[in-house]
């Protein structure tokens, strides 16, 4: 018989179906439920269903599907333009680095980055590009 597969993509919040490994497309969008339950309907007597929740390999190429999703996400990230300065007027890269260091309790290093941010904002070094004035 045929093999019907279902794929819940939490990243895209979609549910797609497959028949014998061939994608049938997205059936549901904006799936926000935390818990979902599979359901199978049968029409005639003596029909039978065998469910596979990962105990045996799936017919669809899940690795290729995940790679495709990963490539789409990376393309969207790469296409996102970021400003060179944040709303505080400091170089964005230095501000992100500073906030990361503060969050992870790296106080001394955060102080050094803050000094470079101040110098960059004053125009006395750093060049405003977030490099801290390091040679390239």
Image: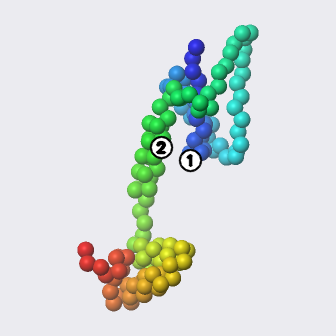
> Badge 2: how crowded within 10 Å, few (<14), some, or many (20+)?
some
Q: Are marks 1 and 2 in contact (CB under 8 Å)?
A: yes
Q: Secondary structure at mark 1?
A: loop
Q: Read off the residue under disc 1.
A: 11
Q: Residue at x 47, y 77 (%)?
A: 98
Residue 81 numbered tag: none
Which picture quadrant has residue 116?
bottom left
Mark nearer the N terminus (1 vs 2): 1
Give the residue furthest to the left.
136
* Residue situated in front as seen by the camera: 135 or 85: 135
Q: How is the image coloured?
A: rainbow
Q: Is residue 69 above or below residue 106?
A: above
Q: Read off the residue under disc 2.
A: 69
Q: Quadrant of the N terminus?
A: top right
Which picture quadrant has residue 103?
bottom right
Q: Quadrant of the C terminus?
A: bottom left
Q: Is residue 28 above or below residue 32?
A: above
Q: Secondary structure at mark 2?
A: helix
Is 34 left, or right, of 71 in this rendering? right
Q: Whole-Å distance between the Cαs marked 1 and 2? A: 9 Å
């Amino acid at each position: 018989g045929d093999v019907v597969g279902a794929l819940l993509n939490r990243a895209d919040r979609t549910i797609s179906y497959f028949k014998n490994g061939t994608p049938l497309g997205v059936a549901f969008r904006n799936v926000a439920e935390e818990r979902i339950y599979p359901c199978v309907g049968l029409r005639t007597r003596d029909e039978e269903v065998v469910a596979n929740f990962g105990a045996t390999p799936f017919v669809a190429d899940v690795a290729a599907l995940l790679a495709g999703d990963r490539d789409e996400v990376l393309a969207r990230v790469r296409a996102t333009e970021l400003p060179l300065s944040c709303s505080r007027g400091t170089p964005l890269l230095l501000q992100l680095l500073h906030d990361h260091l503060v969050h992870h309790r790296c106080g001394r290093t955060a102080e050094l980055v803050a000094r470079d941010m101040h110098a960059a904002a004053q125009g006395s070094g750093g060049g405003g590009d977030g490099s801290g004035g390091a040679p390239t």
